[in-house]
Amino acid sequence: MTIKLAVIPVAGRGTRLLPLAKSQPKEMLPVGRKPIVQYVVEELYHCGLEKMLFITGPGKTAIENHFDLDPELTEHLRHTGKEELLAELEFEREKIQYFYTRQRKQLGLGHAVLCAEPMIGRENFVVALGDSVLGIHAASKVVRQMITEFEKKSAAAVISFEKVPLQDVHRYGIAAPKEGEEVQEGHIFQLSNIVEKPSAEEAPSQLAVASRYVFSGEIFDYLKKTKPGKGGEIQLTDAIQAMITDGKKVYGLSISHADRRFDVGNFESYFEAFLEFAFNDPDYGLSIQKKMRELLK
Ligand code: UTP
């Protein structure tokens, strides 16, 4: 596998989570035992990615601190007889390189990805949103499958999709599969279009972008030409659409239920994610489930 680099945009303001995300990054919100962005990095690392490039912004330094080595804390745990807790810091020692660059103005996700260009050039790379993780406790290997398909098909892009209820299509980029393409869970299909946040009437399908992308460096050429779209933001979806219009091969991968997306970007999905991760906690999951059942009686 040749792709080793993931871009993780974390510069967004998180206004849908006010006041919670006013002075702390939404990407640092706990989902069960870990901040969501740690799950994102673990998911990517287990899919073979070793270089993480964060696109950060104002008020996001807690993310950089979280991935630093903390020798003082390690010493403290050793000296106070809490060696067993050192296992909780093992993630600091994984063979991962961290890079950070700033999005100096929050002009949208497409713009955030474009901020990576000076460090990436024409390399192929993954984009993983820092507020969403695939699979319970980040167990999904979908990104690895996406990279394999990307290389096999010499694609310009491969994007993960998940079926959402019709009333939710207005929140996502929605795929129009190429005519005659069968969309099956776990399988790849070619796209004929992609639309950012369509209304239920306009939506070509219920397949919503599920926060993971593999791109060739060509995406930067398209992002540079992309004008502000929905919400006045430079939309990644619009750049992908321009690629398709230009005849580039763009594929979707329809993810399975086991690989489903957990997203902390709004309160409803944040609460759902937290509950499901807590219910599956190795130590407390069963007792929390029992308590919940009693509460719901
Ligand atoms: P969202 O679409 O949830 O946008 O971002 P947002 O601005 O963070 O949140 P709201 O809409 O104000 O509540 C999806 C991912 O893209 C990043 C976010 O940090 C998040 O991980 N992002 C978004 C950027 O890095 N820069 C941006 O300008 C916008």
Image (cartoon, rainbow, N blue to C red):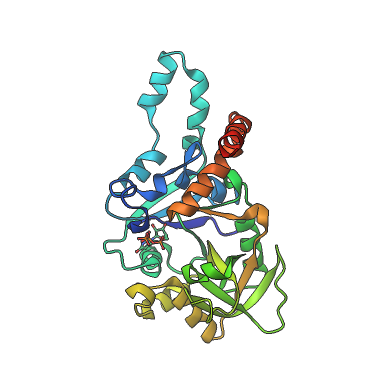
Query: Looking at the image, which residue is at 59% across and 59% down?
Result: 2
Q: Is residue 215 visible?
A: no
Q: Is residue 78 above or below residue 204?
A: above
| Residue 73 falls left or right of residue 186 | left
Residues 274 and 100: in front is 274
Residues 127 and 221: in front is 127
Residues 79 and 24: in front is 24
| Residue 222 falls left or right of residue 296 | left
| Residue 48 % position (x, y) | 59, 51
| Residue 289 % position (x, y) | 61, 35
Q: Quadrant of ligand 1?
A: bottom left
Asked which quadrant contains residue 182, the reply is: bottom right
Residues 170 and 238: in front is 170
Q: Is residue 180 above or below residue 31?
A: below
Q: Can you say which quadrant of the picture contains the N terminus?
A: bottom right
Q: Can you say which quadrant of the picture contains the C terminus?
A: top right
Q: Is residue 251 visible?
A: yes
Query: Looking at the image, which residue is at 38% across and 68% down?
Result: 114
Count of labels in the image: 0
| Residue 113 falls left or right of residue 289 | left
| Residue 39 % position (x, y) | 51, 45
| Residue 207 % position (x, y) | 60, 70
